[in-house]
């Protein structure tokens, strides 16, 4: 019995997500979530894919000791007919169950999670409509940083009031109440500290006592915040935001000096605001940045020198950590990068003419893969740099730049490619994050870039964007064997 119990998380409870399709069931459904807060920092989603049963039903069983923010996608046949979000970012509590019935016009919800799950769908309709999104975006255009702070505070209060109004006179699990409030407060705090670098006026914001007064009452060490995946995001953004404010309010010489010691300074800032395990997690975030940057050097002559530098930074950060296991966890990811190349996982997709194609079809070429979608603003923002890359390598027959779209509307995609004069080798997989490629390469966000060598071996699964500097790794791989 002890051996069996050790297999499950401490105090884990069996949680069930099931349902059926009233009509036109897909081939399969995919369920995604971050099993732990650390998984979110590592961008390491747990992914379950299940074929739909003959009676159009599905059933997932999860053992968890914490609320999980679920995403579910359908998986269709061919890129024109499949790959739709059924729902996303919906919390379920440990030990609860929920049954969905999906039809063309509605989603019916039953089970122990019925009340708070229904609330989350109504919340989405209420706050994630076009008017709400426009209002949020308009906040970033307000004339002063104090106007922005007041607007964001008002937004937070409206969201919390909506919860209180919805559940007035009703029973709501206290754990869900804590999780919802923590999620909203974290969202508010992240926006406030991001203002220092997302806005041209942001440099003075975090140096203004009146602005900081909106943030200072937030308990960054609240245990309730650990219930929310995005907490790791806040632990990264707060010290980065303060550092950005420092850089924007000094001359260029001082700014370069600050940037040169950014990890030591972000450690110092973290020490002021975070305590105990929270501080350890903040330092782990900084270590993960070193591992991510090392990904970008994979396959280049700078890999070993950067690895030495990164390891020294990680050693310095680890000296202040209580949980040394986090340091070892980061080091293990770094060691994995240093190992020999492994075969790039093969996957199938469709070309623009709906013909099935495979990554292995391109063996013999260096392949730079760009996973993107027309609805992804950061993806589209890369287009000028993509065209610059195409021009740079236009006479090199040894490289293929492959663009794999997660769009599920083939006609709209082709219209976009024509209007934007976006040439190149285009594949499509409308199953998006439920696709074979997303599962094998653990793609939970786009854009995402991957480099494969001539032998079909994976150079890096997290390459730099065209707007950054992917040329170093590509040129190194292109020169191999010459």
Image (cartoon, rainbow, N blue to C red):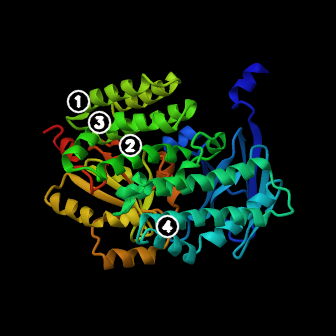
Apparent side of residue 217 relative to residue 460 in the rendered image (left or right): right
Tags 3 and 2 in contact by the CB under 8 Å rule?
no
Q: Nearer the viewer, mark 3 or mark 2?
A: 3
Cα–Cα gap, marks 2 and 1? 25 Å
Q: Nearer the viewer, mark 1 or mark 4?
A: 1
Q: Nearer the viewer, mark 2 or mark 1?
A: 1
Q: Circle 2 — which element?
A: loop
Q: Mark 2 points at which residue?
A: 344
Tags 1 and 4 in contact by the CB under 8 Å rule?
no
Cα–Cα gap, marks 3 and 4? 47 Å
Pointer 2 or 1: first along the chain: 1
Closer-to-camera residue (95/424) = 95
Q: Mark 1 points at which residue?
A: 305
Residue 240 picture location, percent across and down: 40, 46
Q: Circle 3 — which element?
A: loop
Q: Name the residue under label 3.
A: 261
Q: Nearer the viewer, mark 3 or mark 1?
A: 3
Q: How crowded is mark 3: few (under 14 residues within 10 Å), some or many (20 or more)?
A: few
Identified at 34% across, 74% down, the residue is 417
């Amino acid at each position: 019995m002890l051996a069996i119990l050790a297999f499950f998380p401490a105090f884990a409870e069996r949680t069930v997500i099931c349902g059926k399709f009233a009509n036109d069931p897909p081939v399969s459904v995919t369920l995604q979530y971050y099993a732990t807060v650390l998984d979110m920092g590592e961008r390491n989603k747990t992914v379950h894919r299940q074929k739909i049963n003959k009676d159009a039903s599905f059933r997932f069983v999860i053992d968890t000791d914490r609320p999980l923010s679920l995403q579910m996608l359908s998986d269709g046949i061919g890129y024109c007919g499949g790959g739709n979000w059924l729902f996303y970012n919906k919390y379920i509590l440990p030990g609860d169950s929920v049954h969905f019935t999906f039809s063309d016009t509605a989603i019916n919800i039953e089970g122990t999670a019925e009340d708070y799950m229904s609330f989350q769908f109504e919340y989405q309709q209420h706050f994630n409509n076009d008017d709400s999104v426009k209002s949020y975006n308009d906040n970033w255009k307000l004339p002063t940083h104090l106007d922005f702070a007041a607007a964001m505070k008002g937004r937070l209060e409206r969201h919390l009031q909506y919860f209180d109004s919805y559940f007035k006179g009703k029973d709501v699990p206290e754990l869900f109440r804590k999780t919802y409030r923590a999620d909203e407060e974290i969202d508010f705090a992240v926006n406030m500290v991001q203002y220092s670098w997302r806005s041209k006026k942001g440099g003075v914001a975090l140096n203004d006592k009146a602005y900081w007064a909106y943030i200072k009452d937030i308990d960054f060490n609240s245990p309730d915040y650990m219930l929310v995946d995005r907490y790791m995001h806040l632990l990264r953004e707060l010290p980065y935001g303060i550092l950005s404010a420092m850089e924007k309010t000094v001359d260029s010489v001082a700014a370069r000096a600050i940037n040169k010691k950014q990890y030591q300074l972000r450690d110092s800032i973290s020490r002021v605001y975070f305590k105990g395990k929270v501080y350890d997690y903040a330092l782990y975030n900084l270590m993960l940045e070193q591992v991510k940057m090392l990904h970008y050097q994979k396959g280049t002559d700078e890999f070993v020198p950067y690895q030495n530098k990164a390891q020294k930074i990680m050693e310095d950060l680890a000296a202040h950590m209580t949980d040394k296991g986090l340091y070892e966890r980061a080091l293990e990811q770094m060691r994995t990068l240093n190992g020999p190349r492994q075969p790039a996982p093969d996957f199938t997709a469709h070309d623009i003419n709906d013909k099935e194609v495979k990554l292995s079809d391109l063996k013999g070429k260096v392949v730079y893969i760009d996973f993107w979608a027309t609805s992804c603003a950061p993806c589209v923002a890369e287009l000028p740099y993509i065209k610059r890359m195409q021009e740079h390598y236009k006479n090199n027959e040894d490289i293929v730049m492959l663009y794999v779209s997660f769009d599920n509307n083939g006609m709209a995609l082709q219209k976009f490619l024509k209007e934007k004069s976006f040439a190149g080798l285009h594949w499509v997989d409308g199953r998006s994050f439920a696709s074979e490629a997303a599962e094998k390469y653990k793609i939970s966000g786009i854009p995402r870039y991957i480099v494969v060598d001539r032998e079909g071996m994976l150079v890096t699964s997290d390459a730099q964007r065209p707007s950054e500097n992917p040329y170093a790794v590509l040129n190194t791989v292109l020169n191999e064997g010459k």
